[in-house]
Image (spheres, rainbow, N blue to C red):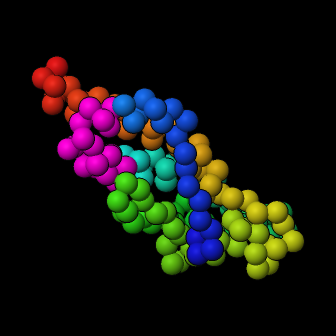
Amino acid sequence: MAASSWRVEFGDIEALENKLKQIPGKSEQTLNKTLHSDGVNLAVESIQPKIPVSTWKGRVRNKRHAKDQKSLTNSKLNLGFTIRPTPRFNYLKYPDLGIGTSKKNAPEKILEHGLQTATPKIAERLNIELDKVINQTMGG
């Protein structure tokens, strides 16, 4: 979202850190590869179901809803990624932040809650991929 920014912290960072120390030359590449392929997909899969469907007078509107479309896009960062709505669905920032016509409502924080749901899955995937690289490097 344009004005929304937050980070995710992994709970068991020490275990991840110990694995990174075992493969100092390959750790960054492994993390980036995993985050950019599996991590971003897990995050989008967790966010998409949380997107609200627009209603009018209590009825679901007869239109394409962001929840059912490919409404999120991502960009790769070093050791991370950014998820944003596609330009067509950029209006998602209003309920997410509680601004515009949604200012009378509490912020829904759709992206943040979805990413919090995906964080344990992403951490597990990072640990699995690091274990694979450690086993290949150490000859195990």
Apparent side of residue 140 relative to residue 9 in the rendered image (left or right): left
Instruction: Look at the image and give the residue range highlighted in magenta.
Output: 19-36
Query: Which residue does the image show at 37% across and 49% down from the upper left?
Result: 35
Does 17 appear above or below 32?
Answer: above
Measuring from the top left, give residue 109's x and y in whole percent. Answer: 69, 59
Q: Residue 129 is drawn in which quadrant?
A: top left
Does 48 appear above or below 103?
Answer: above
Does 140 appear above or below 72?
Answer: above
Residue 49 appears in the picture as rendered: no
Query: Which residue does the image show at 84% across and 66% down from the upper left?
Result: 105
Foreground pick, 28 / 36: 28
Our reading of the magenta stretch's main secondary structure is helix
> What is the residue that sits farthest to the left in this orientation?
139
Does 137 appear above or below 105?
Answer: above
Query: Which residue does the image show at 46% across and 63% down from the upper left?
Result: 82
Measuring from the top left, give residue 56's x and y in whole percent. Answer: 79, 70
Foreground pick, 91 / 64: 91
Foreground pick, 124 / 11: 11
Position of the N terminus, as image quadrant, is: bottom right
Measuring from the top left, give residue 91's x and y in whole percent. Answer: 63, 75
Query: Which residue does the image show at 79% across and 78% down from the upper left?
Result: 101
Apparent side of residue 46 relative to residue 21 in the rendered image (left or right): right
Residue 28 appears in the picture as rendered: yes
- Number of numbered discs overlaid on the protein picture: 0
Measuring from the top left, give residue 40's x and y in whole percent. Answer: 42, 53
Q: Residue 4 is drawn in which quadrant?
A: bottom right
Q: Does 73 appear in magenta?
A: no
Position of the C terminus, as image quadrant, is: top left
Apparent side of residue 86 relative to residue 112 in the rendered image (left or right): left
